[in-house]
Amino acid sequence: MKKLQLFNVGLYHKAHHMKILKTVAGLKKQITGPVLRPLGFVPTMGALHKGHLSLVEKAINDCPSVVVSIYVNPTQFNDREDLINYPRTPEDDIALLSGIMRKNDYVLMPRDKEIYPEEDNRVFDFGNLDKVMEGIHRPGHFNGVAKVVSRLFDIVNPDIAYFGQKDFQQLVIIRELVRQCGYKVKIVACPIIRENDGLAMSSRNRLLDPQIRKNAGIIYKSLLSASKMIKSQDIPEIKKFVTANIEAYEGFKVEYFEIVEETRLIPLSFKNDMKSEEVYFGCIAVKAGRIRLIDNIKIPLP
Ligand code: AMP
């Protein structure tokens, strides 16, 4: 009951060291003027786990003041069911954050009207970057991500923003967004935090059927195998292996597995095309029961 009351308070709540703001105006009042800089920013969709907390901890370590946003952004969901079912755990999120956040740190938990006071019809052009992998399977997704991230950057005006490498393609697109829009924010990429069996932590993991969850470690295990196979096998064989290895488990379906150069994201057909001065990642999306999971791994040069 106590927690529920806490969530109902108006502008912000003072029981924690950090401040919780529900409005853009409330946040702006706090962070304009002589705000402590560098100001760090961690955008999230909540249902926080250790992956999110690793970003927040890094931000706290680097910056005297940090803003964490918790906002399930409707414009980035191409699948209505996914938006409806997306886990929302605001009270747990506040409890987790209040364990690490400080006096000059802020949590922004806005309503839709705060982020989109009017319809946002912007269309971004990311060239090839949003035409491959997630871009094919989640049409419109990255345009929605770009809308919300640019809006949040305008609101927060951070010096440093922290993103997880788990969403590898998103990270590349956000770097491009920053370049195109001329934001003066430094983008910091943080490593993927995993469960004991290797499954990349994700808010959606809690939606997995127990039987599916039990086998979901196969995704990362297959990526590890792929990173080793590149020495002795070519990309078509590796793709075949990864797909078969994962789909051997009931309920698992590989949407794509691509090996791409880390900035242009053009999928490679053969390892002959790999250049010694470049860096490559193997990126995967798997439908695990009804839940869609993504992961990636660095692929060494053969
Ligand atoms: P989300 O709430 O899914 O939008 O994620 C918010 C941020 O946390 C994004 O920058 C994600 O890439 C990052 N993130 C999510 N899961 C992980 C993870 N397992 N390890 C590291 N970062 C993550």
Image (cartoon, helix red, strand yellow):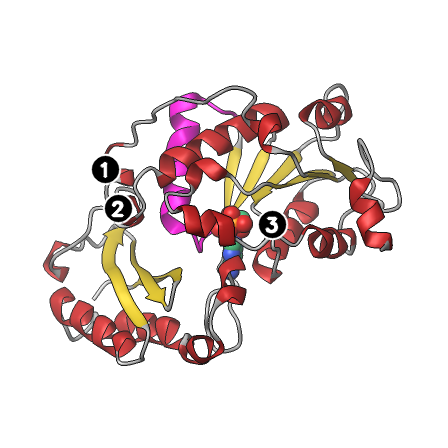
Percent coordinates x, y for residue 243 in the rendering: 23, 71
Q: Nearer the viewer, residue 111 or 84?
A: 84
Quarter occupied by residue 96:
bottom right
Q: In the image, is 291 to the left or to the right of 72?
A: left
Q: Which residues are magenta?
A: 164-184
Is there CB contact under 8 Å for labels 2 and 1? yes
Q: Which mark is residue 46?
A: 3
Main structural element of the magenta stretch: helix, strand or loop? Answer: helix
Q: Nearer the viewer, residue 47 or 259?
A: 47
Can residue 157 be seen in the rendering of this structure?
A: no
Quarter occupied by residue 20:
top right
Residue bearing mark 1? 128
Give me the C-alpha separation between circle 2 and circle 1: 7 Å
Percent coordinates x, y for residue 276 in the rendering: 21, 55
Q: Is mark 3 within 8 Å of ligand 1?
A: yes
Residue bearing mark 2? 265
Name which residue type carries label 2: Leu
Is 78 located above or below residue 88 in the figure? Answer: above
Q: Nearer the viewer, residue 79 or 222?
A: 79
Tell me what residue is drawn at x 49 percent, y 24 percent: 183
Dot 1 crowding, Cα within 10 Å, few <14, some 14–19, many 20+: few
Name which residue type carries label 3: Gly
Quarter occupied by residue 299:
bottom left
